Image (tube, helix red, strand yellow):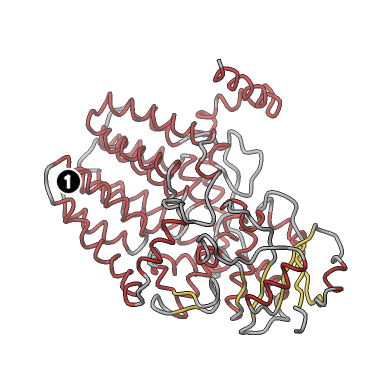
């Protein structure tokens, strides 16, 4: 009865929000997306004409939200470029950041994503799609063409245009690795996993899991041998950690960051481990496809079942891969399974798998997405970067800035007061200028243990304490848009030297941040 009441309540809320016509549209979304997504895809690709001018670095992604968020990876790439994986960065974390902690990044793909975001994503997804042609002489050619056609015009493919990052270059080789495992061509598997290791650490870890399972079920060691070249390549990423005797400390920090270890962690995940409606719906689409695959293909469905288990662990226990990686995992597995089954009926269930309602795909920067994917185009980050560089003009190379945030009280999701995405802009712009902007995620992870000092507090006493503790030259505070700087700051000895109004970029941002855009004030710290 409780479940029924919850279902009725959810229906009533949906009815109030969408109306009867909106609910009917949602019910027919598989047909709607079949005809509208190809149009949106053509529009998105047509908008990429702006890349013809060669300024690929100006367009990191397809939406304001993901473009700003991509600067997280640009900051890391820039530091690796300057100091190397064995070096230390004065611009990350607490100011002496061991870049050996970056073992989980593959620099070729990270570098490509940094200097050419949109072209990298386009090349990666095109390569992933074309890699399924490897089945053309093994499976039914008509089914291969049908599955690949549906994959290309699916909302999931479109969604990954908006959400993928540097890992996309690793996903190019994942279907080829599966092909080698499923056909017993171990050399192909080995080459695929090795190639993937230059694009994504995550893809190789997942490939290793599938190799292990295939080895157990087929009673042969060859799948394990096939993963060894990629494993040895990634093992080399850990050498700087071992040389600096940081291996156990850093790996424990990573375990805390993904939620695998929480007993002694200062910040714990809460909301990100709760099952939500989106995850329930996606799980139902996985179940219907698994059932169809089992009835039509028998043991072929086991590979998809393993993917479902990985998705479940990642969603509920510890988050070792981001949402878009899980999306590509299930997308890849579903596509390969549909091709290998080679039964016309599987196309219907496959379309339901790869065509979830766009509302459940969490398109960033776009509101009111229901049964049609939103229009997208490459986003030019340069106006925002120019504005931030102007904001930071009073700060000189080698100086340090602290931004004041409320204490998250141990909640991972409350860190940075909901401004995490916006924070990537000053973090990157500061690194370019040789300025240390803090706090950042790397600093949070360095202090993610019980009893650690912190850098929180938006009141005057906390700000003065943190300025002294972290040897800060400037303070950034945020206030509601359109307000004057609160007098208490100047009364405490701070001097206003800059202002950045996010509302000046409302047209460019297009709802990139959910909430009112703030004003940021740059304050010179009181002279001691």
Q: Nearer the viewer, residue 276 or 225?
A: 276
Q: Residue furthest top?
A: 1
Toward the left, the furthest residue is 220
Quarter where residue 501 is shown: bottom right
Q: Nearer the viewer, residue 150 or 498?
A: 498
Pick the quarter of the image with the N terminus: top right
Q: Quadrant of residue 72?
A: bottom right
Q: Position of residue 242 (x, y in %)?
A: 32, 73
Q: Position of residue 152 (x, y in %)?
A: 43, 43
Circle 1 packing at 10 Å, graded few (<14), some (14-19), many (20+), is: some
User: Residue at (16%, 52%) from the top-left corner?
Assistant: 186
Residue in front for this viewpoint, 464 or 194:
464
Q: Residue at x 42, y 33 (%)?
A: 353
How many numbered markers are drawn? 1
SS for callout 1:
helix
Q: Is residue 240 visible?
A: yes
| Whole-percent x, y for residue 156 in the image | 47, 42
Residue 497, compared with residue 505, is above or below; it is below
Q: Going by the image, does 168 lie left or right of 443?
A: left
Q: Where in the figure is residue 3, as x and y percent of width and height?
A: 54, 20
> Measured along the vertical axis of the image, is residue 473 above or below residue 271?
below
Q: Is residue 1 left or right of residue 255?
A: right
Quadrant of the frame with the C terminus: bottom right
- Residue found farthest to the front: 451
Whether residue 352 can be seen here: no
> Would residue 300 be found to the left or right of residue 162 on screen?
left
Residue picked out by circle 1: 215
Residue at horizontal 53%, vertical 41%? 361
Left or right of 335? Residue 477 is: right
């Amino acid at each position: 009865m409780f479940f029924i009441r919850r279902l009725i309540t959810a229906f009533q809320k949906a009815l109030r929000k969408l109306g009867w016509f909106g609910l009917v549209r949602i019910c027919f979304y598989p047909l709607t997306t079949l005809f509208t997504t190809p149009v949106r895809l053509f529009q998105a690709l047509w908008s990429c004409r702006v890349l013809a001018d060669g300024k690929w670095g100006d367009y990191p992604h397809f939406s304001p939200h993901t473009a700003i968020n991509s600067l997280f990876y640009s900051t890391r790439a820039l530091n690796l470029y300057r100091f190397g994986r064995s070096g230390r960065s004065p611009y990350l974390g607490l100011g002496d950041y061991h870049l050996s902690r970056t073992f989980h990044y593959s620099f070729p793909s990270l570098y490509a994503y940094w200097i050419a975001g949109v072209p990298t994503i386009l090349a990666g997804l095109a390569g992933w799609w074309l890699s399924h042609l490897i089945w053309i002489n093994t499976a039914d050619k008509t089914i291969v063409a049908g599955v690949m056609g549906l994959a290309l015009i699916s909302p999931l493919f479109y969604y990954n245009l908006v959400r993928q990052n540097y890992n996309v270059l690793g996903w190019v080789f994942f279907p080829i690795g599966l092909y080698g495992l499923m056909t017993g061509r171990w050399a192909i598997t080995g080459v695929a996993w090795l190639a993937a290791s230059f694009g994504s650490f995550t893809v190789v870890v997942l490939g290793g899991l599938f190799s292990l399972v295939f080895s157990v079920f087929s009673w042969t060691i060859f799948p394990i041998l096939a993963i060894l070249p990629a494993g040895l390549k990634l093992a080399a990423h850990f050498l700087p950690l071992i040389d600096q005797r940081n291996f156990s400390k850093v790996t424990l920090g990573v375990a805390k960051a993904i939620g695998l270890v929480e007993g002694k962690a200062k910040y714990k995940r809460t909301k990100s481990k709760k099952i939500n409606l989106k995850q329930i719906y996606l799980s139902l689409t996985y179940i219907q496809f698994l059932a169809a695959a089992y009835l039509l293909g028998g043991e072929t469905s086991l590979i998809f079942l393993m993917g479902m288990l990985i998705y479940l662990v990642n969603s509920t226990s510890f988050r070792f891969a981001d949402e878009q990686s899980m999306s590509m995992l299930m997308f890849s597995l579903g596509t390969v399974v549909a091709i290998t089954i080679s039964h016309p009926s599987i196309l219907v269930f496959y379309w339901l798998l790869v065509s979830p309602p766009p509302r459940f795909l969490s398109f960033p920067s776009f509101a009111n997405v229901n049964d049609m994917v939103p229009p997208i185009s490459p986003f030019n980050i340069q106006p925002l970067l120019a504005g931030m560089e102007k904001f930071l003009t009073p700060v000189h190379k080698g100086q340090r800035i602290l931004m004041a945030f409320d204490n998250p009280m141990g909640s991972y999701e409350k860190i940075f007061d909901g401004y995490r995405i916006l924070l990537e802009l000053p973090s990157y712009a500061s690194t370019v200028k040789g300025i240390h902007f803090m706090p950042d995620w790397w600093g949070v992870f360095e202090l993610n243990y019980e009893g650690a000092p912190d850098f929180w507090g938006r009141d005057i006493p906390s700000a003065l304490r943190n300025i002294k503790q972290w040897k800060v030259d400037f303070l950034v505070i945020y206030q509601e848009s359109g307000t004057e700087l609160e007098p208490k700051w100047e009364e405490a000895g701070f001097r206003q030297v800059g202002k950045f109004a996010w509302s000046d970029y409302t047209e460019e941002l297009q709802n990139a941040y959910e909430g009112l855009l703030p004003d940021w004030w740059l304050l010179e710290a009181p002279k001691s």
